Amino acid sequence: MYKPLNFWLIGGDHRQAALAHALAEDGHSVHTYALEEGVDPAWVQSSLTGAETAHCVILPLPAANGELLNAPLSTHCPPLSQVLDALSPQQLICAGMVTPALTQAAANRSLTLTDYFAREELAVANAVPVSLAV
């Protein structure tokens, strides 16, 4: 039996916005934070309150811009520490191009990050549109 899930997409670019639309079309609950452009305004959250209830949290590719969340489609770029503090250990947390510092910061909070960019098929598929844009 199909059970809709609660997704939080935090930060990111147009790829995150497209993912938000695809998840909503599949019937899932979608919330975005630090991702205002290109998404349904009803999904946009002004704080991370409630993020701890998500089944899955998806951070951008790359996840970090230094110590800040990578959030080019947002008016604000919160510190990654603020984002991680809002999450809980039982969640599936996915991020792209996870740095050792981000992995350690998550581990210090008993969080486990899954680096989706470490999957070869994603890295190759992502390289095609990037190479065409150059």
Image (tube, rainbow, N blue to C red):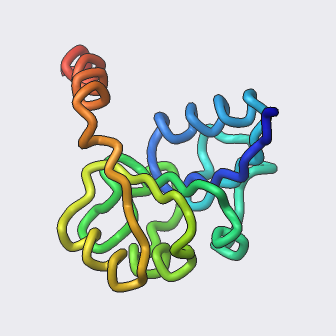
Q: 87 or 3, which lies in front? A: 3
Position of 126 with respect to 40 (left or right) is: left
- Quarter of the figure with residue 27: top right
Residue 129: image location, x then y, percent: 30, 19
Name the quarter where the N terminus is drawn: top right
Residue at x-position 41% and y-position 50%: 60
Q: Is residue 13 above or below residue 111?
A: above
Position of 113 with respect to 18 (left or right) is: left
Position of 103 with respect to 75 (left or right) is: left
Name the quarter where the C terminus is drawn: top left
Q: 31 or 91, which lies in front? A: 91
Q: In this view, does 123 lie above or below 13?
A: above
Total count of labels:
0
Position of 1 with respect to 106 (left or right) is: right
Query: In this view, which residue lies farthest toward the front?
Result: 1
Residue 111: image location, x then y, percent: 43, 73
Residue 50: image location, x then y, percent: 72, 71
Residue at x-position 65% and y-position 57%: 55
Residue at x-position 64% and y-position 29%: 22
Q: In this view, does 127 lie above or below 132?
A: below
- Quarter of the figure with residue 33: bottom right
Residue 18: image location, x then y, percent: 57, 31
Residue at x-position 36% and y-position 75%: 106
